[in-house]
Image: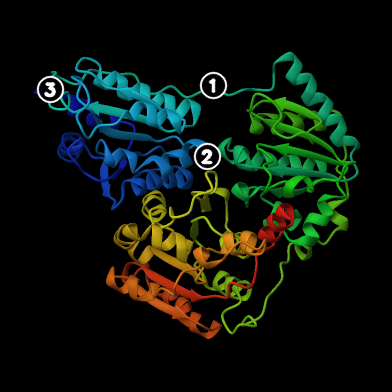
Amino acid sequence: MPTVSEHVALTLSQHVDHVFGIMGNGNAFFLDALERDTDARFVAMRHEAGAVVAADAFWRASGRIAAATATYGAGFTNTLTALAESVQARIPLVLVVGDEPTSGPRAWDVDQIALASAVGARTYTVGRADAAATTVIALEHALTYKIPTVLAIPYDVARLEVGPVPETEGPRPAPVLAPDAPFTAAAVGHLAQELARAERPLLLAGRGAHLAGASEALGQLADATGAITASSALARGIFPRTEFDLGVTGGFGAPGAMELVHEADLVVVLGASLNQFTMRFGDLFSPATRVVQVDLAPAATHPHVGSYIRADVREVALALVARLREIGASPSTWRESVDVPALRAHAPGDDLAPDGRLDPRSTAIRIGELLPEDRVVVSDGGHFIGWANMYWPVASPDRMIMVGTHYQSIGLGFPSVPGAAAARPESTVVLTTGDGGGLMALADLESAVREARGHGMAVVWNDNQYGAEVNVYGKLGVAEGPMLIPEVDFAGLAASFGAEGVVVRTLADLERLRTWAAEPADERPFLVLDLRVSGDVVAPYQEEILALNR
């Protein structure tokens, strides 16, 4: 007769096709049912945090919900940093965990509900009579509120026999906030009039616009208004016409592009939260620029916003296009008068830095030229995130994934690879990570090599230091000893995990990337480029942070 664990596994598998995790006492029977009775694929990870990271990356790369799983106690507490990142990034996933028995905690149990709540995740605990329904509720909560949920199976309940799995309704999608309510419709009409009058309009899109599926609608709005476009780091590539797009705003943006943003007389912000990095710490817009924000948040998210419209970004964009046509508005000619591609250019760098190590700017440019075009870039956290964001173009927002940036964490890079690879098996997954974060996540290098194989590679910016700390606190006079890392042979580590490692000391050493990219994906190894880069070349966004701290 089916058990509680089977009810959870069978119900979950109706809506989730990938489960990432590690087996332990608390989830053994759930995983047994998942393997025996469902078509869902279990992907073994080597650290519990990596299980949550992989499920997170799976969503970011595909827009499909995945599950993670871990045992109770130490297994659960190991997930907390990754769980906090997913909460703050608003990533829907379900974390299936074991939990203390209903009779009460044992010596090794902790209050998992309180711990999950502390990082912002809600827990649903299954019982003997409601396991299937509770599983659907956990899924629905995750999808409705775009947030991870924890699904707990008490240890003494997991094996209880409970009869056939009942029929359950699937999770119901959240309704779209359409712009047809009276006050919202009036605000949209007023914004259309403003866009018709604007001489230098700019559209700035963020991750919310991508989640709304607004790319095509934003392209229509840009053409209807003649606006120059730009995006936050999590929405790169969202505008269809790159010839009029300034790229990413903030510290990852090119200086000329950011200067042009200051010339805009009207900025419409679509699905971007305007965090401190996007806003260049408040210096992105001119004080004379009028800023209108469209988002699903309850209220405007930055004090520079003059007007706020709470509605679905795609629906508002389409409504604006229709209204502009109704009033016979002519598009601005601003974008036709500006050489936008030239403004996107970043500093080229030198072959080698003055200290004789690789200049990360020229290295990033060369890697960007050699990478397979069909790629998904996954990024760990650290100083080096500037190089990929500045020099590696991607085709769409779901192809640049930065797990860890919302929670300011490092060490989540290698486990991002299996999640992205499962979501995009036809693409090449390219990890960009530092030596500090790479060492922290080393257990899941094995997972990356196993799951991505010839469809994956890693670029390790090996500068013998925690660069973000050196570039800010070191320059403020803080002792640098604790910020330094002895040089680690990541190429050798890669070989021990079954990958091919290449130490890169000159640009000529990147020749192996060219030949690797030309090989059939099914025949090539997972490739790790161990870049011996200079720590003296500082990314512009870090210079902004240093200036702020000073």
Measured Cα–Cα span from mark 1 to mark 3? 37 Å
Left or right, 117 with reference to 37: right
- Please say whether residue 515 is visible from this viewpoint: no
| Whether label 3 touches label 2, CB < 8 Å | no
Mark 2 highlights which residue? 89
| Whether label 2 touches label 1, CB < 8 Å | no
- Please say whether residue 370 is visible from this viewpoint: yes
Q: Residues within 10 Å of mark 1 (few under 14, many from 20)?
A: few
Amino acid at circle 1: Pro
Disc nearer the start of the sequence (1/3): 3
Disc nearer the start of the sequence (3/2): 2
Residue extending furthest toward the left: 1
In the rendered view, tell whether residue 12 sits above or below residue 361.
Answer: above
Amino acid at circle 2: Ala
Between residues 228 and 93, which one lies in front from this camera angle?
Answer: 93
Mark 3 highlights which residue? 160
- Where residue 4 appears, as percent x and y from the top left, is 18, 24
* Helix, strand or loop status at disc 3: loop
